[in-house]
Amino acid sequence: MAFVESPVQLLNVLEWAHSDALRVGEPLSAVPPQIRRDVPVSPEVSALTIVVLSPLDPMSRGQLRRVAELARDQGHTVRWQEARGGTMAPLHTIGGLASKLRRAKRVVIGDPFSRYVQLLLTITRARDLVVVDDGTATMEFISQLARGERLVRWHRRGGRLGVRDLVFAPFSASARRRLTPGGKRTVEVFSSMPVEAPEGVTVVENAFAWTRATFGPPRITKGADLVGTSLVETGVVDTDRYLEAVGQLARTHGATRYFAHRREATDKLHRLARETGLEIVRPDLPLELIARRGPIGRTILSFPSTVVHTLPLALAGTEVEVAVCDIDPAWLTENASPRAQGFLSGVTGTARDVHRLQSVRTA
């Protein structure tokens, strides 16, 4: 069984299933790129049941439904759960999944920080656990697991635990123990991020082989495209500084389109379009698939985010260049986590096959 809560997690489950099928059969390097789309899925992988713990925001739901269609086309079973549709929804969801989860021999999860997933991990008896990428959060998960720390998202501020944190602490601690290999229990991390495995954890590279085998190559336009981020929405970056930086990047590099992050606020995007003149694009699929299908700009501009690691892999063999602009410390809000600057710098510094841009100076 696999549990996902975002379109990127679901895409990475498809990538993992493709990679696992090739590992069961032939090594990925032994399968020519032009025929990888025809590689049969192994019986073990074809029996995968993917449970979508649906979020509430419309953009995420829309993208999830589109990627779910792709998953069904690959022969997987997709079970859509309205996991957040009212106060009783979590109890109904967990109760309905418990028996099947107890029988599962392998469990794949997309977000080890999710309280939903942590609760489900206390039920499973599976000996094989797989964590697929949930973007750059995977880097923080690996480092916290290696240090034996409680699982906390990087953008959350430190300090005292809230009431909900205290109530949930035993479940979180239990989930962390289950995600630590030991005895007959194995833990695999399937990632495109630059992570170093803690002792006993197996790391398998996500090279976006399924995406490249299924879509593209894309038609490449002469201009530049800009990728949005939800750093404003998470309280890390100041809105005015962000909008000014986007405008300067667009003018400097001739960008005309802005691919919005699925969690970006509508009012912010309206203001961005008005002040910068950029065409706002609300993708209906994860950007890795959008870029691979094309058309896409010859240059893709981004701030530190997951795509500076994933797009070079998804677009390997094309002439598209990915360029990343650092976050100036002056853009951070007073509520930003003390770890924010170091984490964002690490995201940029560890990215491969990207062009580094100097941070934009704002007023």
Image (spheres, rainbow, N blue to C red):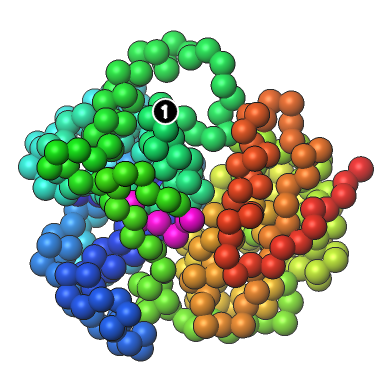
Residues rendered magenta in the picture: 189-194
Q: Residue 194 or 121: which is nearer the viewer?
A: 194
Q: On screen, 266 above or below 348?
A: above
User: Is any part of residue 276 visible from this angle?
Assistant: no
Where residue 120 appears, as percent x and y from the top left, is: 24, 33
Query: Is 116 within the magenta?
Result: no
**Residue where numbered disc 1 is placed:** 149
Q: Residue 79 or 301: which is nearer the viewer?
A: 301
Quadrant of the snapshot with the C terminus: top right
User: Is any part of residue 135 visible from this angle?
Assistant: yes
- Tell me the kind of residue under disc 1: Glu
Query: Is 191 within the magenta?
Result: yes
- Indicate left or right for 140 with 40 as reference: right
Where residue 182 appears, as percent x and y from the top left, is: 19, 38
Residue found at x 48% / y 46% = 139
Q: How many marks?
A: 1
Graded by Cα atoms within 10 Å as few (under 14), some (14 to 19) or many (20 or more), the crowding at tag 1 reads few
For the residue labelled by badge 1, is the local secondary structure a helix, a strand or a loop? loop
Residue found at x 49% / y 70% = 313
The residue most toward the right is 363
Residue found at x 76% / y 68% = 255
Query: Quadrant of the rendered structure where residue 104 is?
Result: top left
Residue found at x 68% / y 54% = 303
